[in-house]
Image (cartoon, rainbow, N blue to C red):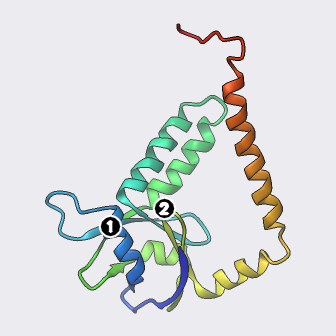
Amino acid sequence: LGTFQHKLEDKGRLSSPTRYRDILKEKYPLRPQQDDLEIILCYIGPHISAYPRVEWDRLADALSEAIALPGLHQDARNLEHMLFGNAAECPIDSQGRVVIPPHLRTKGKLNSEITIVGHNRYFEIWDRATCEQYDASLQGYELLEIAQKIAELRNARIVARPSLFDDGLQPGL
């Protein structure tokens, strides 16, 4: 969580926030035979998304399931093409730096001024000016209304599940 301002070095090296490294070490410990922390970087315009391996694998599994759904097949394949075709496995060195590959720096239009925006299970790497424009576009956006709608939908889904078997009968029993 949180937003951090950083500089991208000429060679594409970016220092990850200490807080993020600490969270990665705590929540996503190194696997056997793994020397450095690793994140998966991918372009999902207008920014680069950075996922711990475990979260990336969850995303990949969910996408694989979506590909099998009627009606989502081609959209899911297109997303799969964009996500996996542009992704890169990137180690975080002992000094907390990650090298963003040139193709991702180009796609994300990353300059030397970077904004890192943390989310629950991943973080985003933005060109600072692009991030500021995006943030400005959200001004006046009814975020509270959207949050309330999401809560209502979530509550409706949770409430609806128990009522499926009000007659006392349960399938498969």
15 left or right, relative to 31: right
Vertical order, 44 against 67 (above or below): below
Residue at 79% in and 52% down: 149
Query: Which residue type does callout 1 highlight?
Result: Glu
Vertical order, 166 against 115 (above or below): above
Residue at 75% in and 59% down: 147
Vertical order, 15 against 43 (above or below): below
Front residue of this view, candidates 94 and 114: 94
Residue at 37% in and 54% down: 54
- Secondary element type, mark 1: helix
Query: Which residue type does callout 2 highlight?
Result: Arg
Q: Is residue 67 visible?
A: yes
Q: Mark 1 points at which residue?
A: 26
Query: Which one is in front in this view, the residue at disc 1 or the one at disc 2?
Result: 1
Q: Quadrant of residue 95?
A: bottom left
Give coordinates of residue 108: x percent, y percent. Answer: 55, 75
**Which comes sooner in the sequence, label 1 or label 2?**
1
Q: In which quarter of the image is residue 31?
A: bottom left
Vertical order, 60 against 55 (above or below): above
Q: Mark 2 points at which residue?
A: 121
- Secondary element type, mark 2: loop
Give coordinates of residue 155: x percent, y percent. Answer: 72, 43
